[in-house]
Image: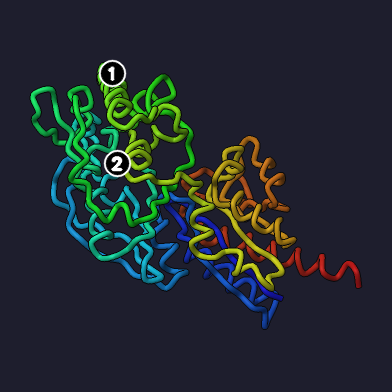
Amino acid sequence: MRFLFASDSFKGTLSSEKIIELLTASANNIFPGCEIVGVPIADGGEGTVDAVIAVTKGEKRFITVHGPLMEEEESSYGVFHEDCAIIEMAAASGLPMVPPEKRNPLNTTTRGTGELIRDALERGYRKISIAIGGSATNDGGMGAMRALGIRFLDNQGRELEGRGSDLLKVADIDMAGLDPAVAEAEFTVMCDVNNPLTGPDGAAYTFGKQKGGTPEILDQLEAGMKNYAAVIREKTGMDVDKIPGAGAAGGLGAALCVFLKATLKSGIETVLDLMDFDGLLEGTDLVVTGEGRMDWQSAFGKVPSGIGQRCRAKGIPAVAIVGGMGDGAEKIYEFGVESILSTINGAMEVEEAMDRAEELYRNAADRMFRLLRAGMKLGK
């Protein structure tokens, strides 16, 4: 009997590594002598770098970058397989890096994310994957591109810093100084949203509020994004509003596609490809996945749906242990997950469930493996 454990973390309570530990103990108890493979999993959000380098035996590179407010911050990215690098923009330009009282997308920049990319290029990495969730920014990716040598100019020819407030000032783009290593590299962007750069579903109005944008600030950002898109169209001939996902991470998606010729791809699919998940499935009898809360959104780009579809393609059953179930959780059955088991085993408040997360997960794992053992006896 070979088990593969590949669950997302339960945010705020259980890490992927702890879940693997709990499942391993339970499996060994119910199925002594079983073979176990455990891999931490993330969907392109927080924990993606750690998950990929854990499976690929990679390591982290630490450098000092400029944070969202241009303050110096220590950051890192992952490297593996000699020429591959994986970057989380949240590690350099993430919302948690900005105190709530200072959150204003007019003032933030993706400069640090560009510095991570530049460092990876300087060290010779040519296959670069970038997870762009969790940003504090709405600068259209100008800060990141400026770190790579592109100059954004106002109507007086003065170089702009690359913050959200600069979008409305952009009159010209000078790409002559773009790092030549960019042309030698292949960029993949982990993105699970299809929002355009501008409009009611664009970067400003969809994501700006959570970054501190008031209605007045969002209107200013939207006007700036329209100006920015027009200048990009004039300089490159590309209509960024026709690129699904251009509005992701406050427009960083647009900059990466236009200036770095990046390919946008599902976060979980990228992670699974980087860790050769299909290879890990060989010889596996059952896969256990999961996440903190499963609902209708779980079927769209989340860990369980990505895992389930890979398992279904190989004819391997997958089950999910989750912290809780919401509306539409059963939709995951259409994506290769055979069953859902909740860790909650009685009436309790959310706070109690979180405090008892480890105990409840262990109990759910025991119940699952015991049921599996009972099922195996049916044909006998």
**Residue 168: percent from left, percent from top:** 21, 22
> What amino acid type should be assigned to the residue bearing mark 2?
Leu
Please tell me in which quadrant of the rendered image residue 285 appears.
Answer: bottom right
Q: Check whether the beta carbons of the residues at disc 1 and disc 2 lie within 8 A of each other.
A: no
Residue under numbered circle 1: 223
Depth check: 90 or 380 in front?
Answer: 90
Residue under numbered circle 2: 95
In space, the residues marked 1 and 2 are separated at their CA atoms by 23 Å
Above or below, 240 against 359 in this view is: above
Residue drawn where x is 29% and y is 25% of the image:
234
**Residue 135: percent from left, percent from top:** 32, 41
Mark before the other along the chain sequence, 1 or 2 = 2
Give the quarter of the figure containing the N terminus: bottom right
Q: Residues within 10 Å of mark 2 (few under 14, many from 20)?
A: many
**Residue 13: percent from left, percent from top:** 45, 55
Q: How is the image coloured?
A: rainbow
**Is residue 219 shown left or right of residue 271?**
left
Q: How many marks?
A: 2
Residue drawn where x is 48% and y is 49% of the image:
267
Residue drawn where x is 33% and y is 27% of the image:
233
Which dot, 1 or 2, sits closer to the camera?
1
Please tell me in which quadrant of the rendered image residue 373 appears.
Answer: bottom right
Depth check: 321 or 131 in front?
Answer: 131
Q: Residues within 10 Å of mark 1 (few under 14, many from 20)?
A: some
**Residue 21: percent from left, percent from top:** 52, 70
Callout 2: SS: helix
